[in-house]
Amino acid sequence: MESFVTEERLERSLARAAWKTPQQLRSLRAWRIRPTDERALKFFFHTNTQAKADALAAVLKARGYQPQVRKTGAFVDWTATWLEMASWAVSGLTPPLPMAEDVLLAWAQEMCRLGPRHDCEFEGWFCETPDFLEKNDDHWLQGRPDGTMDLDIYRWSAASEAALAENDVYWVSPGSGLGSLEPLQRYADKIRGLRSPSEALSLASIDQLPALEQIYLHKAPQAHGDYRKLPKLRGFRSLDAEKLDPRWLNNPSLRSVELRRPRKLKTLKALDGWQGLETLILSGAPLASLEGLAQVPALKELRLANCLSITDIGELPQAWGVERLEMFKLPKVQSFEPIAGLKALRWAFVHSRDGTLASYETFKHWPELQNAGVLLQMGRVDFEALARHPSAAELMLYTQKGFALPGEDELRRVLQAHGRQVRSVFLRPKDECPSIHVTFESPYWRLPAAHEGHARMFVE
């Protein structure tokens, strides 16, 4: 059997350690774990045989570690060619280690190089933290991955005020026990995130919290405020925007907006203050078209779902800088040809059983494409166009009912005819809409973390 840890795996493991270790430490700082503290870490290695796992476990045990070897799976047969999956894991606890960044980074790099000596890949480490820092009848204080803290306030008291005053709190979740936002105004300079306020609270005085950078509304508040008055607001997310006047979001500082059921948003032309907006996510918006999209010149990500009134997406190419596109449940849109005009696309996820696109030859218009999941009615599939694509890493393509897919060997030959190396091919010829799942070798797979556009979930 070939070596499990290739040069690519080792490169990816080292990059992951360098990228992830500082992030994990920031999270631990929020749980009051300091550089001088010592903690036992849980570690993880993977390989493809028990003999390799046992050999590594013996070395780790001699170092004072507490390793365990367990079977996690098997090689999976997708089609005629197996897709490699780790089948054995070595995990356990280290002796207590200092929580200083330089120490942990050096240790992680050592593990990255120790594993390959026994043909095992180091996946990473984990440190146990408590479920919460403080929890009582008045508030609940927790750590965040970025090193700040979350504070849920059930009622305003000396204890909940002290939790807000004495900690680096980012998100504050005010409950109905507060009665209003007034008690928070004394600490307005440090509250940067407002999350899931009680629907019994009014946000009419939201401008009294001018340091807010993020707002997340799980339910509609008693009353919305004028969000244009928040000079630092970067992100706004509302899962119930039915009563929201979209004009109150015309804030040039906004970078990301997600609105679900924005019943008052009938046209994008009303949004003339989004010059800096980079992400727009709409679900259930009563739009008839995308007219006005040109007023969002900095847009990088556009996600539309359950917009049942949209009949035409002809204005889509006006968002020329869009890199991430997601369209789901737009039943009245017949032609999706305008997506070919988005030359900067890197991730495209478009699903419509009734929508049409002439051919996947459209992919040649997207030279930066890396990920795509497209379900549209197709007259033909230009496999040569796919084979010539310079950067695509993963493509999930659906055809029309009754489409005859080529055999796997033939498809591999065509896809590799122009120098691209095929990583895996998965065909579903018997589905209602026959589909093709192709992955190519790409620098994408060597990134230390999962690609931001990979395996996207559609907005419902």
Image (tube, rainbow, N blue to C red):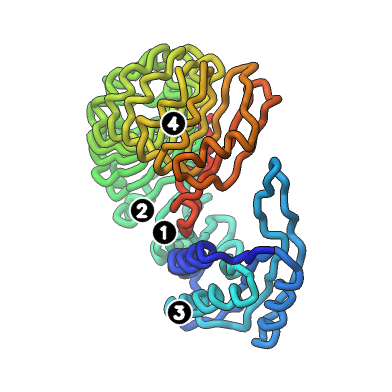
| Relative height, residue 313 to residue 88 (above, below) | above
In the drawing, what numbered circle is on residue 154?
Answer: none
Neighbours of disc 2 within 10 Å: few (<14), some (14-19), many (20+): many
Q: Quadrant of the N terminus?
A: bottom right
Query: Which residue sits at x=61%, y=40%?
Result: 425
**Pointer 2 and pointer 4: residues touching (CB < 8 Å)?**
no
In the image, which is nearer the foreground, mark 3 or mark 1? Answer: 3
Circle 1 residue: 169
Amino acid type, residue under disc 4 in the picture? Ala
In the drawing, what numbered circle is on residue 191?
Answer: 2
SS for callout 4: helix
Task: Describe residue 197's horizontal placement relative to residue 412 as left or right.
Answer: left
| Inter-mark Cα distance, 3 to 4 | 51 Å
| Relative height, residue 215 to residue 17 (above, below) | above
> Which circle's residue, 1 or 4, is located before the other in the chain?
1
**Pointer 2 and pointer 1: residues touching (CB < 8 Å)?**
yes
In the drawing, what numbered circle is on residue 100?
Answer: 3
| Inter-mark Cα distance, 3 to 1 | 23 Å
Amino acid type, residue under disc 3 in the picture? Ala
Query: Which residue sits at x=60%, y=74%?
Result: 115
From the viewer's side, name the closer residue of 61 and 392: 392
Neighbours of disc 3 within 10 Å: few (<14), some (14-19), many (20+): some
Neighbours of disc 4 within 10 Å: few (<14), some (14-19), many (20+): some
Circle 4 residue: 385
Can you give x and y, in whole percent of width and height, for residue 333 in the image?
45, 14
Query: Which residue sits at x=51%, y=60%?
Result: 141
> Which circle's residue, 2 or 1, is located before the other in the chain?
1
Amino acid type, residue under disc 2 in the picture? Ile
| Inter-mark Cα distance, 2 to 4 | 51 Å
> Which circle's residue, 3 or 4, is located before the other in the chain?
3
